[in-house]
């Protein structure tokens, strides 16, 4: 049991604040860790990186090594890295960088450092914030309520398939595709075989979490020419297990639900002002007046919501 | 009987339910407002209690009911009336997944549609849905009746024990081990007796009565493919 949520605003605004409310209302679904994927104002060039390091005694050296890899690929920091270190064993970082020559090649090189420091999101707009603890604790630590943007995802994790570790929590970035993130409620039973296939194609997975597969799987299908809608539909017959997942990019949010219809999704859509969550009482934190809710209760469902009522490329 | 108002909002649900139980002991009729789709409202209600929930409620509303009459104005989340042994629950709008899960008696009346696995593992009692029942409704229901007037989704009446699923309208597909029977006049009269007090008896219903083929009651290796379909 996990809790997931999504939010699309009519116009860019305090999407972080609403996502924290949505996740606070669903904290009982998973208290291990909480995470957010927030799509802030997009850049014309350059990327924002979010990530984590695991050896606090070596912060300076490990961050410097990551910066070396960035420079090796023709990019540079736009400002000093922002570091966040508290009583937890890990520390978190945020960096803004200019464009590397080849994004995938740079990510592959940066991933040689992942036993010490790992990138957890890379996007023109996307920032993934995740940590152990409940919604309020993670929001307080990382200032999530103050984050502005057009849309985003949230996740409360009850670990069933892998360890409770800060980097094994959701959302997951579709490494190395910029600006793609997923949240997942359920269990994928054949993730190991899919992972092996994707690893043979050169993809890299950093955790033992089954959900990490989904982001890369969908992105790989889209790289091969499928639209997001086609990839979501294909996931229902291709990926085995129990799932309702949501995937976001800069255009909006899509979802897919498995053939057994175990994991709910409730949506309020008021003319493109949209909140999605596992539980209705969570979306009612954002839309408190009695209003129409859509229950995606059936099996084998998919859907897409565009930002600003834009139709997503079908 | 005076009316007592319970305001839910973001209060702790245990405190709300204690206030409801206290009002039941006084014999008040209860109106619950500002429900905000919260979970576990009105669980374990005593016989004779009368409650009206304004708006929509979350999961397990009216669960473990032992004889109260409950009306929900709009929608209910998962498992409305789960495990109830007696009483009557009316849902004005849509009822989510697992309506009346494992219920042991009483009646649940849904005016809109119902979600997947309506009546899952029910032991007795009646569920009447004016709209359509969702995917895999009646899944492993032991006894009692599920009656849908507006059709059924896929895999209807899947893996039944001894319950009956009655559907008027289209059935998208049947579940594993379903046998569709032509009901006798006596059986139709029994169902009409359930519908009559709800104002829903109608001789023009074209019933499909679904019962278990009893093939899944015991595992036999020749049935392995049927088991794998579940």
Image: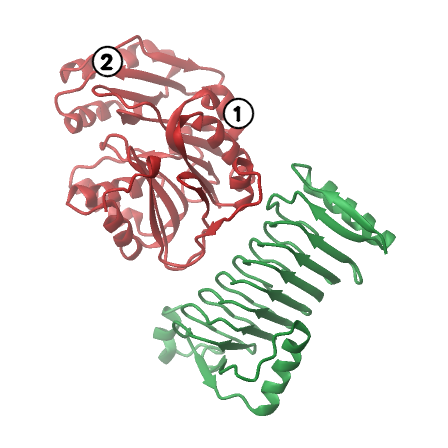
Chain colours: A red, B green
- Quote the CA–CA distance across marks 1 and 2: 30 Å
The tag on residue A67 is 2
The tag on residue B229 is none
Q: How many marks?
A: 2
Crowd band around label 2 with a 10 angstrom C-alpha radius: few (<14), some (14–19), many (20+)? some
Q: Position of residue B196 (x, y in %)?
A: 66, 78
Q: Chain of mark 2?
A: A
Give the residue drawn at x 55%, y 40%: A284
- Dot 2 lies on which element? helix
- Dot 1 lies on which element? helix
Residue B42 shown left or right of residue A167 in the figure: right
User: Do marks 1 and 2 both belong to one polypeptide chain?
Assistant: yes
Q: Is residue B75 above or below residue A167?
A: below
- The answer to which of B61 and A173 lies nearer the viewer is B61
Residue, disc 1: A137
Residue A111 shown left or right of residue A162 in the figure: left
Give the residue drawn at x 41%, y 30%: A36
Residue B175 shown left or right of residue B48 in the figure: left
Q: Position of residue A111 (x, y in %)?
A: 23, 26
Q: Is residue A106 above or below residue B210?
A: above
Among the 4 quarters of the image, the one containing residue B177: bottom left
Can residue A184 be seen in this snapshot?
yes
- The answer to which of B197 and B154 lies nearer the viewer is B197
């Amino acid at each position: 049991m996990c809790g997931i949520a999504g939010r699309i605003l009519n116009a860019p605004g305090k999407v972080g604040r609403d996502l924290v409310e949505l996740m606070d209302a669903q904290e009982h679904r998973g208290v291990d860790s909480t995470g957010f994927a927030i799509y802030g104002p997009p850049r014309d060039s350059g990327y924002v990186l979010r990530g984590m390091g695991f050896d606090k005694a070596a912060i300076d050296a490990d961050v410097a090594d990551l910066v070396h890899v960035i420079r090796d690929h023709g990019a540079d920091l736009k400002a000093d890295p922002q570091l966040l270190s508290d009583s937890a064993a890990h520390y978190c970082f945020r960096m803004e960088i200019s464009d590397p020559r080849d994004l995938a090649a740079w990510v592959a090189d940066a991933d040689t450092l992942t036993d010490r420091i790992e990138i957890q999101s890379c996007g023109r707009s996307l920032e993934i914030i995740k940590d152990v603890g409940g919604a309020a604790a993670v929001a307080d630590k990382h200032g999530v309520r103050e984050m502005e943007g057009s849309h985003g995802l949230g996740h409360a994790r009850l670990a069933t398939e892998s360890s409770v570790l800060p980097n094994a929590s959701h959302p997951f970035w579709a490494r190395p595709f910029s600006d793609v993130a997923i949240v997942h409620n359920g269990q994928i039973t054949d993730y190991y075989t899919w992972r092996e296939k994707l690893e043979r194609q050169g993809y890299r997975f950093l955790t033992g979490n089954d959900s990490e597969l989904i982001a890369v799987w969908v992105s790989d299908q889209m790289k091969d020419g499928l639209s997001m809608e086609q990839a979501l539909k294909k996931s229902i017959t291709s990926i085995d297990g129990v799932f309702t997942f949501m995937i976001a990019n800069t255009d909006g949010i899509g979802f897919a639900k498995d053939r057994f219809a175990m994991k709910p999704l409730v949506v309020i859509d008021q003319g493109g002002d949209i909140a999605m969550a596992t539980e209705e009482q969570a979306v009612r934190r954002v839309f408190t007046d009695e209003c129409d809710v859509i229950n995606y209760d059936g099996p084998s469902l998919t859907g897409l919501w565009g930002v600003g009522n834009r139709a997503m490329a079908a | 009987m005076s009316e007592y108002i319970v305001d839910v909002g973001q209060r702790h649900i245990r405190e709300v339910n204690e206030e409801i139980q206290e009002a039941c002991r006084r014999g008040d009729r209860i109106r619950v407002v500002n429900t905000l789709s919260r979970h576990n409202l009105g669980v374990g209600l005593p016989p004779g209690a009368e409650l009206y929930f304004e708006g929509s409620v979350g999961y397990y509303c009216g669960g473990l009911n032992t004889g109260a009459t409950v009306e929900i104005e709009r929608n209910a989340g998962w498992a409305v009336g789960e495990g109830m042994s007696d009483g009557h629950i009316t849902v004005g709008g849509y009822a989510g997944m697992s309506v009346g899960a494992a219920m042991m008696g009483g009646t649940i009346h849904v005016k809109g549609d119902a979600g997947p696995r309506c009546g899952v593992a029910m032991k007795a009692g009646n569920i009447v849905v004016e709209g359509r029942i969702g995917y895999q409704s009646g899944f492993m229901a032991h006894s009692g009746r599920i009656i849908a007037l507006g059709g059924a989704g896929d895999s209807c009446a899947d893996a039944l024990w001894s319950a009956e699923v009655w559907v008027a309208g289209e059935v998208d597909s049947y579940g594993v081990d379903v046998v569709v029977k032509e009901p006798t006049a006596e059986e139709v009269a029994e169902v009409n007796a359930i519908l009559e007090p709800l104002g829903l008896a109608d001789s023009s219903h074209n019933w499909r009565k679904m019962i278990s083929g009893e093939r899944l009651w015991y595992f036999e290796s020749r049935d392995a493919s049927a088991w794998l379909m579940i």
